[in-house]
Image (tube, rainbow, N blue to C red):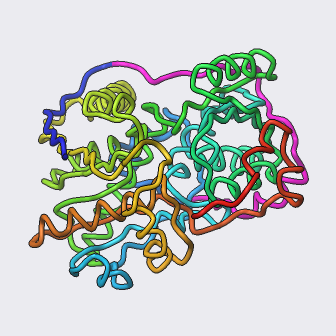
């Protein structure tokens, strides 16, 4: 089942979501930061600032991404897809430290944490959360302490590797258990942390989601240069909806009729049309407040759809189609896929491509092809509460 949505975009004054902070300064983490800071770019040009120059200096930002990222045909998996005319935007290679769709968001979010004088990043995610891994790696590279409260999800090889990578980064890991106990333990972590800055699950808020408005402007420049055709449809896995919302608003700003399709990978209560519309409105309010020329624009409809077919039993749960897609992800980007995001997105892409044979379709790749170091010793490297997730064998 696919829910389609077209909403009229209109600027309105408002503000951005805030976060706790304190006096200036961030803690030293010399061993970790020294080893990883060289992975960060010294500078880069931001298409969003070129489009709305008033934003420069008025919203926090610092370079983390190596961009633009390539946009290339999905030639390696044409057999699997059953057609050509499908492209991929390779955000998996956006940083040698760690790729995926959180890097563009963290250019805004971690700059905001620095500006507010935060010392500790506190976040929440699943056991295999790529957002938690990105927070741990980039946060430590910039000298923050990192505390991550992790809720349970079906355990996989990728999930075990994610836990070991989180541990190797130097982040403090707290077992959350279910959603309710995770929320309570996150509150406790915030209370005891030094100068905490809270990062929402998925890092979805108005400020960081501007990273994918900027990403769509980046894609437009590549289309103008002839590197790829303008897509009729863009497919992206969608959890908290921030990437989907940012791309949809960016397409409206460009005047493109492109539909952004979010492949739902989490519960419907967290991933639905109302959530995406809310995120789009919040970004628009932020832009209207910081860039007055944005309010003078009359934007075309924000076009997006949510595809509900790939999720299966729930977040992180395997389906036959996602298991079959895991090796296809590796053919496409060089590393195995995982069932929570990348494999389900690819399975959905296959069906969407068959349903729209005359369209040019683009997959926005949000998995990282850079795989960070793992802590040695397996479960012994983690707090005892995580030991049970390393018991027995996993099938995928």
Q: Is residue 71 magenta?
A: no
Relative horizontal placement of residue 76, taking residue 379 as reference (left or right): left
Q: Is residue 297 above or below residue 351?
A: above
Residue 197 sits in quarter: top right
Q: State the image coordinates of residue 157 (x, y, percent, origin top left).
A: 64, 60
Residue at the image position 36 percent from the left and 28 percent from the top:
269
User: 158 or 333: nearer the eye?
Assistant: 158
Q: Position of residue 178 (x, y in %)?
A: 60, 27
Residue 182 figure quarter: top right
Which stretch did the figure color magenta? 14-43
Magenta residue check for 19: yes
State the quadrant of the C terminus.
bottom right
Residue 307 higher or lower than 201, as above or below: below
Quarter of the image for residue 43 reads bottom right
Q: Is residue 28 left or right of residue 62?
A: right
24 w.r.t. 348: above or below: above
Q: Is residue 338 left or right of residue 9?
A: right
Does residue 299 lie above or below 366 as drawn? above
Is residue 8 left or right of 236 when viewed as pictured?
Answer: left
Look at 36% across and 63% down and name the residue there. 321
Q: Position of residue 59 (x, y in %)?
A: 50, 34
- At horizontal 55% and vertical 52% (from top left) the residue drawn is 103
User: Residue 31's spot in the image, x, y percent?
Assistant: 90, 54
């Amino acid at each position: 089942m696919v829910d389609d949505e077209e909403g009229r975009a209109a600027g309105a004054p408002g503000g951005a979501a805030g976060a706790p902070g304190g006096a200036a300064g961030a803690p030293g983490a010399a061993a970790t930061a020294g080893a990883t800071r060289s992975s960060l770019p010294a500078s880069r040009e931001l298409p969003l600032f070129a489009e709305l120059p008033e934003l420069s200096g008025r919203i926090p930002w610092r370079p983390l991404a190596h961009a633009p990222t390539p946009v290339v045909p999905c030639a390696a998996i044409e057999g699997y897809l059953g057609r050509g005319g499908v492209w991929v935007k390779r955000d998996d290679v956006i940083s040698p430290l760690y790729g995926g769709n959180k890097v563009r968001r963290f250019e805004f979010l971690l700059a905001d944490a620095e500006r507010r004088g935060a010392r500790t990043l506190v976040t929440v995610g699943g056991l295999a959360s790529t957002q938690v891994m990105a927070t741990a790696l980039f946060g430590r590279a910039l000298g923050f302490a990192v505390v991550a409260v992790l809720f349970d999800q079906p355990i996989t090889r990728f999930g075990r590797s994610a836990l070991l990578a989180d541990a190797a980064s130097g982040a403090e890991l707290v077992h959350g258990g279910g959603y309710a106990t995770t929320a309570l333990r996150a509150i406790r972590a915030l209370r005891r942390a030094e100068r905490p800055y809270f990062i929402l699950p998925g890092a979805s808020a108005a400020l960081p989601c501007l990273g994918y408005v900027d990403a769509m402007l980046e894609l437009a420049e590549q289309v103008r240069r002839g590197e790829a055709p303008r897509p009729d449809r863009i497919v992206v896995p969608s959890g908290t909806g921030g990437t989907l919302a940012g791309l949809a608003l960016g397409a409206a700003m460009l005047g493109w009729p492109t539909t952004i399709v979010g492949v739902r990978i989490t519960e419907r209560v967290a991933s639905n049309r109302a959530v995406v519309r809310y995120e789009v409105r919040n970004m628009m309010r932020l832009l209207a407040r910081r860039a007055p020329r944005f309010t003078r624009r009359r934007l075309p409809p924000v076009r997006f759809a949510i595809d509900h077919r790939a999720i299966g039993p729930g977040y992180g749960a395997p389906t036959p189609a996602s298991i079959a897609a895991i090796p296809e992800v590796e053919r496409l980007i060089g590393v195995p896929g995982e069932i929570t995001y990348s494999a389900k997105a690819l399975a959905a892409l296959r069906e969407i491509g068959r349903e729209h044979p005359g369209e040019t379709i683009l997959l926005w790749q949000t998995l990282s092809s850079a795989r960070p170091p793992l802590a040695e010793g397996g479960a012994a490297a983690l707090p005892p509460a995580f030991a049970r997730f390393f018991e027995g064998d996993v099938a995928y």
